Amino acid sequence: MQYLFRRWGKKFLSRTASHYPIRSASGRVLLSPLQKDEIRFIESWFQDRRTCELAFGVKAPWDVLETIREEYIEELQKDKVGVLSVYLEKDNKISSPVGFVRYKLFEKGRRRQARVGIILGPPEHRGQGIGREAFQTLLDYLFEQRDVKQIELDTATFNLAAQACFRACGFEPIREMEFTSINTQWTEKRLVMRLSRQQWERR
């Protein structure tokens, strides 16, 4: 994920002011720009080995995961556009962040495209449809408000739960590739998936 975010990392400011938070169709999930003081939540999530493996798409020794973790958090702190915290709302109360989504916009020819990703933090929030709802909300935002024509992502080949989520949102696999961490020599296979505006509209 890190490699591809950098590769397609040209940033674009919104043409019109976005109104935050962005709410999911059910109103349960909210997306809002990551705040500096929320980095501490992410740091706590990444103390869990399984969370790191799912987030980075790498099954590696802990010292390798630590290196990737430090690099990833540093990258998040520098990213001023395209990182949205995921919150839950219940009984008019908004939770602390339970994850975040990312997007990078770029132009290919005359077509605006995006690369996206999602990370859920606390394990207790997995398997409840929160990730899918947050991710679908991000996709709707990009297609409806940012005039995106096509969206791509990559996920670890071993992360079958994530692949099921992305397929449920309409993504289709297009190829496999190898990913090598920048600060380590660890390599994992990734599955690249794609969703076009036409596919999204049909859904």
Image: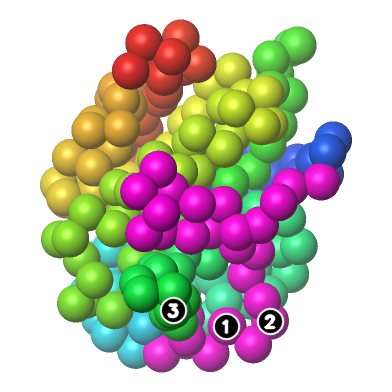
Q: Secondary structure at mark 2?
A: helix
Decide: is 52 above or below 81.
Answer: below
Residue 132: x %, y % from top left:
30, 47
Q: Is residue 67 visible?
A: no
Depth order, front residue of 108/44: 44
Q: Residues within 10 Å of mark 2 (few under 14, many from 20)?
A: few
Q: Which residue is mark 2?
A: 36
Decide: is 192 above or below 9.
Answer: above
Residue 84: x %, y % from top left:
58, 60
Residue at position x 18%, y 40% in the image: 164
Tag in front: 2 or 3: 3
Relative to 50, 94 lies left or right:
right
Residue at position x 57%, y 76% in the image: 73
Q: Which residue is mark 3?
A: 93
Boundaries of the magenta span: 17-44
Distance (Cα) linking label 2 and label 3: 21 Å
Q: Mark 2: which amino acid?
A: Lys
Q: Mark 3: which amino acid?
A: Lys
Depth order, front residue of 61/120: 120
Could you tell which of marks 2 and 3 lies nearer the N-terminus?
A: 2
Residue 175: x %, y % from top left:
32, 24
Q: Residues within 10 Å of mark 1 (few under 14, many from 20)?
A: some
Quadrant of residue 127 within the rendered picture:
bottom left
Q: Secondary structure at mark 1?
A: helix
Residue at position x 36%, y 59% in the image: 28
Q: Which residue is mark 1?
A: 39
Please say if the residues under marks 2 and 3 sit with CB atoms less than 8 Å apart: no
Q: Secondary structure at mark 3?
A: strand
